[in-house]
Image (cartoon, rainbow, N blue to C red):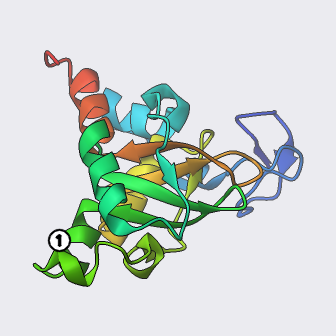
Amino acid sequence: MICCPFCGAENIPGDDLCEVCHEPLSTLHLPEPATEVERGLIKDRLESLNPRAPVVVEPEMPVLPVLRMMLDHKIGCVLVVKEARVVGIFTERDALLRLSDDPQEWKDRPVSEFMTPNPQTLDLKAKVAFAVQRMDQGGYRHVPVVDDQQRPIGVISVRDILRYLTERLGAPV
């Protein structure tokens, strides 16, 4: 039997989630972290990054005002939300790769035509390591953070991860 580090419940070896609190047990199968940074990545949760509140838009919103909103807020993405749920994300990369050099072709078209649909999300209780893994595997620079009802409550960016790592390494921010 293995003991859950979150609630202390006994679980069968090899279980992915604790039977009682449903927290992941996958970190119990990892080698002991060699550094404080590794320990933090495995232990710390996204809430420690203080995710920035998301800027949200409706799928029907035209692309030009969305781009203006991103510029005004100095952000790299907006979450596209329908009925309080994230249905997409529109990022700087989407703008660069999906919009032509002629604004007349796209400025009045809905952002939903250019967004990345169904983005991967995490909740505040997810470990920082999970965000790093998602960003690396998917090539993402932003990960939406949602509550237990899948409503958007924040965004984690690569900058947030770099700031976190810089602080853990003891370098001046």
In the depicted structure, whether residue 77 falls above or below residue 89: above
x and y percentages locating residue 38 in the rendered image: 35, 38
Residue closer to the observer: 76 or 132: 76
Secondary-structure class at tag 1: helix
x and y percentages locating residue 159 in the rendered image: 25, 40
Give amino acid for label 1. Answer: Leu
Q: Residue at x 49, y 43 (%)?
A: 54
Quadrant housing residue 84: bottom right
Query: Is residue 35 visible in this depiction of the protein?
Result: no
Residue closer to the observer: 133 or 91: 91
Q: Residue at x 75, y 62 (%)?
A: 15
Apparent side of residue 153 relative to residue 70 in the rendered image (left or right): right
Apparent side of residue 22 relative to residue 141 in the rendered image (left or right): right
Location of mark 1 (residue) = 96
Q: Residue at x 41, y 33 (%)?
A: 39
Given the current orientation, which residue lies at the most extreme right position? 20
Residue closer to the observer: 33 or 80: 80
x and y percentages locating residue 44 in the rendered image: 50, 32
